[in-house]
Image (cartoon, rainbow, N blue to C red):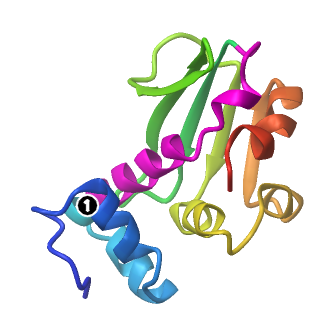
Amino acid sequence: MSPIDLESASPAEIYEAVAVIEEDEFERMMERPEQRQRVIDALVDHMVGLFRAEQAEDIDARIHLKLWDRPGGGYDHFELRIADGACELGEPGADPDLTLKVRPTDLRKLLTGETGARRLALKGRLRAIGDLGLGMKLPDLFSF
């Protein structure tokens, strides 16, 4: 099981712990709703922290991030709002400019540098719907 207390750890501490665990252990965590939510929140928080403001001066966009394979069906849904050179996490609201669909295990691999966004997309493990030009800019906007 996880070497960290998910209840008391900060998102940064959770990310650091899940970044180094084995894939099968991570997948087991994703099967437990109480653990999944804390871990996914930490992954998305880390993603926002990888934002490169200097690359986004002229971008005004809403990106919906949908994480598949939720226990019981469905997905976890987040919104990244890019405006005025900043990226903020918010509740999904208005229609997005771009929707990204990915499994939590693949998001983890992307954020840890184990794989790249283009490679995931070519393998069909990352789907982009909407403004594909914005999707092509993601590797520049985030330091994956």
Image height of 129 relative to 105, above or below: above
User: Which stretch appears magenta?
Assistant: 36-59
Residue located 46% across and 88% down the image = 24
Say which residue label 1 marks.
33
Residue located 57% across and 47% down the image = 50
Image height of 87 relative to 113, above or below: above
Crowding at mark 1 (Cα within 10 Å: few <14, some 14-19, many 20+): few
Q: Amino acid at mark 1?
A: Pro
| Residue 104 drawn at (x, y percent) | 51, 61
- Residue 123, quarter of picture: bottom right
| Residue 117 drawn at (x, y percent) | 77, 56
**71 left or right, relative to 95:** left
Q: Was residue 99 drawn as part of the magenta stretch in this picture?
A: no
Task: Name the chief secondary structure element in magenta.
Answer: helix
Residue located 42% across and 53% down the image = 73
**133 left or right, relative to 144:** right
